[in-house]
Image (cartoon, helix red, strand yellow):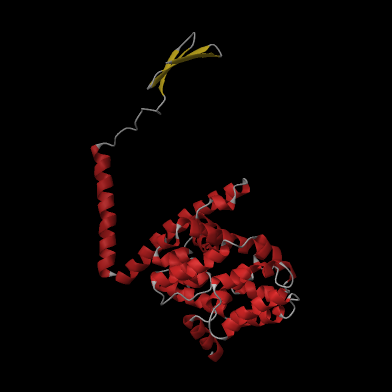
Amino acid sequence: MATGIINRTLFLNTSKLSYSCTYSCVRIYSTEGPHVQPPQPGKVKRKIYDVYLKSLQWVERHLEIKYPKVFKVYKVFKAGTSEFIADTRTYFSVTKQIWGGQELSTFSRKQLEIYREMPECLWTVGPVLAISALPFANYIVFPVAYFFPRQFLSYHFWSTEQKKDFALHYHSQRVAQHKPIIKGLAAKVKKIKDTDSREKLEKILQRIKAKSHPSVDEILAASHLFQEKPLELSHISRPYMRHLAKGMLLHSLLRQKLLQDAVLINYIDRAMQREGIDKLTEEELRSACFTRGLNATRLSKDDMIHYLTQWTTISMEIDETNISLLLHKPVLLAYNHPDNKSIRKALQTS
């Protein structure tokens, strides 16, 4: 038992109760929190609640049986709204912590991915939610959003099939930048004065031209070249910088913004390796591969893990000084992958 006198008040603490005694009153309170429980609902309230719950369950079953398509839409919007709200809360929580000075390395992969993705999601879904709040507007807005989900809804509201289709759509935009990046890289190799360094990059380009890929060790051996002229980010021309940004579906028009976006991806890579790539679900693995330049539609789980392991191994050797290497990794590791090549052929014929 401990005692103490503060402002003429005597505190006596036991394991369960604390007694606060003053000259005029005695107050007893629990150190484990308030013991006062909210009043229990009566029989009538319980009956109303049970009837209401059963009615909702009946409506869901009725929709599922009589109107399966309507029910499917209802389920997608219901689940999407819950996920969207949860991710929005996480985004603002992480943002507040970052503004408070917390290091990016302290956050989980999931938190960093939400922090990276949610601004665009809020920009896409925000107008839909705002307009739907107007009288009768939801009767127009939600059907339009349903028929044009890629334009008016975020991935939270997409079905599994839509996620696959849209992933391919966006990936084709990445792959369209691969050839310009390879041409730009070949042009920059000629500007490297040091013979040994130039030969390392020439070997990498020769492997790509031979329809193969350089090994992780070969890429790491040339990593120092991406922190000096002509491949360091500040020395890259604006047109070439835009190809690199679009190659990872980054909408960064400013060099500093591109640097920030690339650094954030690198932190996500590090968190992914730290937490274990093999612990990701197949959907998470597929999404991670698409983001990092590989068409993962037909890949097995082991193939996706192998690719992401190669990617993150290189990421562990990347920092702000050679961040340009991260932007080149999609072509260095996946340019000649069969599924990427098929997309490139389709783009050429279209």
Most extreme residue toward the bottom, as rendered? 349
Q: Is residue 42 left or right of residue 321?
A: left
184 lies above or below 138: below
Image location (x, y in percent) of residue 26: 43, 13
Residues 64 and 93: in front is 93
Q: Is residue 263 left or right of residue 273?
A: right
Residue 219 visible in this rendered orientation of the protein: yes
Which quadrant would the C terminus be assigned to in this image?
A: bottom right
- Count how many numbered circles sit on residues in the image: 0
Residue 146 visible in this rendered orientation of the protein: no
Image location (x, y in percent) of residue 73: 37, 67
Q: Residue at x 41, y 67 (%)?
A: 283
Name the quadrant containing residue 303.
bottom left
Q: Residue at x 30, y 70 (%)?
A: 68
Name the quadrant containing residue 120.
bottom right
Residues 118 and 65: in front is 118
Residues 118 and 204: in front is 204
Image location (x, y in percent) of residue 39: 32, 32
121 lies above or below 13: below
Q: Is residue 210 left or right of residue 257?
A: left
Most extreme residue toward the top, as rendered? 23
Q: Residue at x 45, y 59 (%)?
A: 276
Residues 329 and 191: in front is 191
Which quadrant would the N terminus be assigned to in this image?
A: top left
Image location (x, y in percent) of residue 54: 25, 53
Q: Residue at x 25, y 68 (%)?
A: 65
